[in-house]
Image (spheres, grey):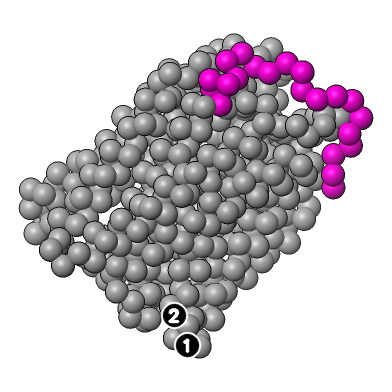
Amino acid sequence: MCYTVTVNKIKNLPPHYRWNFLVFVVDVISFKAAFAFVDPNSVLPAFVRQFTDWAPVIGLVTTVVNGFWLLPQLLVARLINDRPYKKPYLLAGLIGRASFWVVALALWMGLARHSTAILILFFVCVAFFTASDGFTTVAWFDVLARAIPLRRRGRLLGTAQAIGGLAGAGVGVLIGLILGSPSLFFPANYALIFFLAGVAFIPSVIALTTLREPPPEENSVETNGLAKNGWLIPLRDPAFRRVMGCRMLIGMIALATPFYVVHASDVLHLSDSAVGSFVAAQTLAVVVAGPLLGMVSERWGPQYVIRIGGVGAAVAPLFALATHLVKSDWMVQAYPFVYAALGFTQSSWILGFFNYLLEIAPADLRPLYVGLGSTIMGALTLVPIVGGWLLETTSYTALFGVTAALMLLGTLFSLRLGPPSRIALTEEPL
């Protein structure tokens, strides 16, 4: 459904618009490049695979990443929702980005000789990083919504994701060279990867410290009772319930994501250096998807981005299933296509689901909508462990088949999403 164009364009941009536009672009690019070094779909499961081949432990990577990022956000939202300025809370969580330096140092000091100890330290550091980032995220989205209007947000995120994807593709090539180097053995190779991740986060930290937060907007909802039962407000919103139902279904993609890299190694017999090609494929997909989905979001709305992302989410397990059943040489060599589909879906989360939430939420309840949405998604934190159990008790055929079916169901469910009610339908696309 296209927007009705009847009045005029956005006339008054928020204060410091150009500066903040640049800040958010640098932040997203730096974060994407850094996150490519520690990609939870490929790099982190491959690292854990060096110490154990038990599927539930490998699946624990995605559980920790999702759980510690999602679950605390409602508490954070309640803490900061009534605060007029959110930047101090945004900056407070940035300390977690040094976590991977701790893992790198431990590997260089020889802790890898003790499998249990290094895995415990690794999961603690990953949990601290993701919890810190989740703390930052609630404030980040609120400031983004005030600093960048919806009609400019698509181009910002699309551009930043595209450039960040190019940087991530370079990171993927670098990871392949590091893991494939005959002179760089385990665990020094992963120690170097984790160290470089910490370095790549630095421009993001610098950019966010220079952010010029716009003044708060006028309240549209009485929030004095938020501490008691205000968190129920989004649940009374039919648009919130619909988008969260769709998000939960497509979030079930985590059933299979930690196991594609294991499948590639154990069943398809691809080398460890293939992890680099997986990261490169995933991030190159972001390069293509970023501008495309940004344009879709600006022109037709975030609900269409959600639908496109749902299709990408279904393609990944379907291609993996086909490769598993056929095992033809060209399909095995084309296995990075699975990660390309994951990258396309990944690009749709902010431009689709989060953009949708920002626009259906009253201005003074944005942190609550984002936080509650993320906490509800925390119900899916055990999904990767369930995926590991499903793999252990059945087969890759069952795992990929069930995942694909759920993605197709989520895509069908997304057809129920209408235009977000807070979108100014009388604005022209800029």
The answer to whether marks 2 and 1 mark residues whose Cβ atoms lie closer than 8 Å is yes
Q: Is residue 289 part of the magenta span, yes or no?
A: no
The reply to whether residue 275 is in sight is yes
Residue 400 drawn at (x, y percent): 52, 74
Residue 179 drawn at (x, y percent): 24, 63
On the picture, is 34 further left or further right than 318?
left
SS for tag 1? Answer: loop
Stretch in magenta: 1-21
The residue that label 2 is drawn on is 332
On the picture, is 190 further left or further right than 320?
left
SS for tag 2? Answer: helix
Of residue 253 and residue 351, the one placed in the foreground of this image is 351
On the picture, is 77 further left or further right than 365?
left
Q: Residue at x 76, y 38 (%)?
A: 420
The span from disc 2 to disc 1 (Cα, nearest Å) is 6 Å
Q: Residue at x 40, y 20 (%)?
A: 209
Pick the quarter of the image with the C terminus: top right
Residue type at the position of mark 1: Ser
Above or below 281: residue 430:
above
What number is the disc on residue 328?
1
Q: Quadrant for residue 63, please give it.
A: bottom left
Residue 130 drawn at (x, y percent): 38, 41
Which secondary structure is most common in the magenta stretch? Answer: loop
Residue 62 drawn at (x, y percent): 40, 55
Residue type at the position of mark 2: Val
